[in-house]
Image (tube, rainbow, N blue to C red):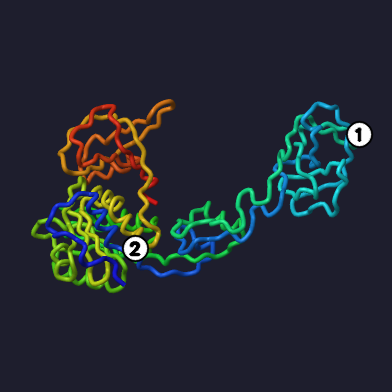
Amino acid sequence: MERLANDCFANASEMISANEALNKISSAASLIVGTETCSLPKAKNRHLAEDIIAPRNVPLFDNSAVDGFAFRYSSDQDQDTGEAPRIVFGQSTAGHPLAEAPPPDTVVKILTGALMPDGFDTVAMIEDVSFAGDNVILPPHLKLGANRRKAGEDVREGQVLLKRGSSLRAQELGYLASVGIDAVRVFKRLKVAVFSTGDELINPGEAIFTGSIYDSNRIILTTLLESYGCKVTDLGILRDERQTVRNALKGAAETHDLVITSGGVSMGEEDHVKTALSETGQLHFWRIAIKPGRPLALGQIGNTAFIGLPGNPIAALVCSLKFVRPLIGILSGWGIDPPLSFQAKADFTMKKKPGRTEWLRGRYTPAKDDVGIAEKYHTEGSGILSSAVWANGLIEIGDDVTYIENGDMVTFLPFSELMR
């Protein structure tokens, strides 16, 4: 099954815009994973492969929302009539309903969640009633249906409970359980291979030497990919040898749906990923008018999709959030609905080159009675991971913008949306 179409890309050497890159990904990629049945306890963060239709109402029956006394409503309840005390006929508790229908002029003691007695439609809270010996005096001015939950109030039998592609978070799993569903059909996890390239890279925990750098990209990428529901294989660090890189790309493509690398896609003599990809597969584009992350390669090796990320960790992170995420969404079946964003007032001034989209590490602070404030990190280097720890999202500056004045409105994309 094809991961990417072969004939929908422009010349790979052309510089394209961020929107063009996203459009090309959208038009080229398609669903590739199969489906499987998964029990609810194991379905966390999976994505539904079919619409779920509610098999029953929730609640299944009319029940009480409070502890109190159920009764049959009459218009006298709307007036202060000095109503006579009523006999308490019996009690209905959760799981133990009243065994027989009570007379219409009585009340029934009822606890939260308990079945409403036949013909009874309203509940007086226990703290609002008064007593005359063993009998109950109802308060005036109650409305018909007060403190009663109606059958089907939350879910109606036959309604679409969740749509195909929905992510199964805690609340969705609880929603399914509430109608008695214990297993669902989900998309299989996308199999993704990840490796870094560079002679200077070493693994955390290894002894550092002059000129070496600890590899942070793989832990960033594997963690992010797992949050997107992928099954990730960490293939480690590859040295700057073209044949080594070529063999690794070919081998990973044979057993995975998507291969992702970081580093090696620029123009340097030791940047072998782009060359190796051209020899083993197809390079569709690799130059996007963005900052950070201009050298971002997308291609395929046989039928397996490939993304070559920049080596700088911030560039790799931002490109993953903006380009890898939608590609995974299409391949995995959960779609590419854009993440939620909102407007904020810029708490900074900056100049920007026209013709490229930029994403700044930003911190959003809400305002009580006004639009919130977006700050940008004090420096923009693509290797400064502290900026991503400080930030709670990205500030997006469009390709047509050349200057931001303090107080201008900017688009803010929270990490909480981009990372799920």
When asked about the image quadrant of residue 267, the answer is bottom left
The foreground one among 281 and 217 is 281
Mark closer to the chain start, 2 or 1: 1
Name above or below for residue 365 compared with residue 112. above
Q: Which residue is mark 1?
A: 133
Residue at 33% from the left image edge and 59% from the top image edge? 328
Instruction: Rate crowding at label 2 as few (under 14), some (14 to 19) or many (20 or more) other CA atoms within 10 Å.
Output: many
Is 50 or 201 nearer to us in this picture? 50
Q: Which residue: 16% across, 58% down? A: 265
Q: Name which quarter of the figure residue 129 lies in.
A: top right
Residue 232 in picture, x, y percent from top left:
35, 63
* Residue 229: mark in rendering: none
Circle 1: residue type: Gly
Pick the residue in front: 313 or 83. 83
- Secondary element type, mark 2: helix
x%, y% of residue 241? 14, 66
Dot 1 falls on a residue whose secondary structure is loop
Q: Quadrant of residue 297?
A: bottom left
Q: Position of residue 404 (x, y in %)?
A: 22, 31
Q: Is residue 413 in view from this perspective?
A: yes
Q: CA distance from mark 2 to mark 1?
A: 70 Å
Q: Is residue 285 above or below residue 314?
A: below
| Viewer can see residue 216 | no
Front label number (2 vs 1): 2
Left or right, 75 with reference to 369:
right
Give the amino acid at mark 2.
Leu
Q: Is residue 345 above or below residue 414?
A: above
Q: Which mark is residue 331?
A: 2
